[in-house]
């Protein structure tokens, strides 16, 4: 890798340009003017080759897309809007500059859709395996970030879209068999829910939000723990990805929804009185939201109700762990 040559090529990629940016790529650091009245929201997530992705199941552009997507999803889960991103990349010998540029194209495709500007990064070499770390900077109306700790007793628990599709896609890709297109997309190019998150942030409602990166079970636990509440999920209400039940059988399908992860849907809670309005907002944005449970009482934990049987749910799903 020729570091300067590569940075030069990265700099020439089509990039969003925000008027708040004073200095982008090219100097020692980036400079931007924060919007007055807003809080800055920032996160970082890292993907490493062989651990978080392999080149057998992901094209370079998919890897780039996903590295940015996991971060944009975290920003959306705060009810915030992503604005800028920075990329640290450690490149091993078996990756060509062209492949790195394809990876950037994947990131930039999502960045253009989401109106996020690339403002810098760092490029180093790696002895083995690609390492890709993305930092996203976003904004939210001051004091309006939607936290995991916002759930209260009586709230409706809801989720956007459907679950298990990413796990199904990965399963089929690894099996080397023909892959259903909607599952391939769910795994490689998951859709973001930023518009919905933004509308929630503009609403006056108290909403707890989390994004589903590890699985519904673990993300529900995170809300329950942060809010000191017990959540009851309703198994029959969990929206399974199309064909999941038919293809994998019911038990496996539920398990994939609970623990498969990487669906990047938003999981939230809202007061029962605001649930109708929240659904209306979602509908306007073409976003499906499903009620999947209730915040039952003060406490800590998650249980699953299925045909009037109540089972404790661990972070790892039904199996205790
Ligand atoms: P410095 O030595 O001052 O850190 P670099 O040569 O690392 O400068 O970077 C020069 C410019 O290129 C900086 O603006 C930096 O943010 C940007 N940059 C470097 N690597 C990347 C990358 N992988 N992706 C995006 N921008 C990068
Ligand atoms: Mg540097």
Image (cartoon, rainbow, N blue to C red):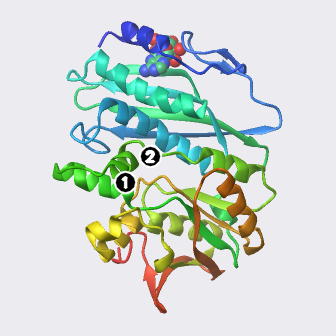
Q: Is residue 221 above or below residue 58?
A: below
Contact (Cβ within 8 Å) of mark 1 with mark 2 = yes
Count of all numbered marks drawn on residues in the image: 2
Q: Is residue 185 left or right of residue 237?
A: left
Residue 54 locus on image (x, y percent): 25, 40
Residue 79 visible from this viewpoint: no
Whether 259 is drawn above or below 72: the answer is: below
- Residue at label 2? 190
Q: Position of residue 210 (x, y in %)?
A: 57, 57
| Left or right position of 287 against 270 | left
Residue 214 visible: yes
Q: Nearer the viewer, residue 31 or 217?
A: 217
Asked if ligand 1 lies within 8 A of label 2, the reply is: no
Which one is nearer the viewer's eye here, 181 or 106? 181
Instruction: Pick whichever of labels 1 and 2 is earlier in the sequence.
Output: 1
Q: Secondary structure at mark 1?
A: helix
- Point out residue 185 in the picture as x, y percentages from the top left corner: 38, 46
Q: Residue 239 in the image: state x and y as whole percent.
A: 47, 68
Q: Label 2: how many residues lie within 10 Å, few (<14), some (14-19) or many (20+)?
A: many
Say which residue label 1 marks: 166
Q: Which residue is the extreme one toward the left?
A: 176
């Amino acid at each position: 890798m020729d570091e300067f040559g590569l940075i030069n090529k990265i700099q020439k990629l089509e990039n969003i340009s925000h008027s708040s940016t004073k200095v982008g790529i090219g100097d020692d650091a980036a400079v931007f003017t924060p919007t007055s009245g807003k809080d800055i929201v920032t996160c970082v997530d890292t993907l490493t080759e062989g651990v978080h992705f392999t080149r057998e199941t992901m094209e370079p552009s998919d890897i780039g897309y996903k590295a940015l997507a996991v971060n944009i999803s975290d920003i959306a889960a705060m009810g915030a809007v992503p604005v800028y991103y920075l990329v640290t990349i450690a490149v091993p010998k078996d990756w060509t500059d062209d492949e790195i540029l394809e990876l950037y194209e994947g990131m930039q495709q999502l960045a253009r859709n989401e109106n996020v500007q690339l403002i810098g990064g760092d490029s180093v070499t790696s002895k083995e395996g690609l390492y890709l770390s993305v930092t996203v900077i976003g904004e939210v109306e001051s004091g309006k970030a939607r936290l995991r700790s916002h759930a209260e007793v009586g709230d409706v628990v809801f989720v956007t879209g459907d679950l298990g599709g990413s796990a199904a896609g990965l399963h089929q890709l690894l099996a080397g068999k023909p892959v259903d297109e909607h599952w391939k997309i769910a795994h490689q190019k998951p859709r973001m829910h930023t518009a919905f998150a933004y509308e929630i942030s503009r609403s006056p409602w108290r909403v707890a939000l989390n994004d589903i990166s590890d699985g519904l079970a673990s993300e529900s636990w995170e809300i329950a723990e942060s809010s000191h509440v017990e959540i009851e999920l309703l198994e029959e209400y969990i929206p399974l990805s199309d064909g999941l039940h038919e293809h994998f059988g019911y038990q496996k399908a539920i398990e994939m929804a609970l623990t498969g992860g990487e669906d990047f849907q938003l999981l939230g809670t809202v007061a029962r009185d605001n649930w109708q309005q929240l659904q209306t907002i979602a509908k306007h944005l073409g976003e499906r939201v499903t009620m999947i449970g209730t915040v039952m009482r003060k406490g800590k934990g998650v249980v699953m109700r299925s045909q009037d049987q109540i089972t404790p749910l661990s972070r790892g799903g039904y199996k205790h762990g």
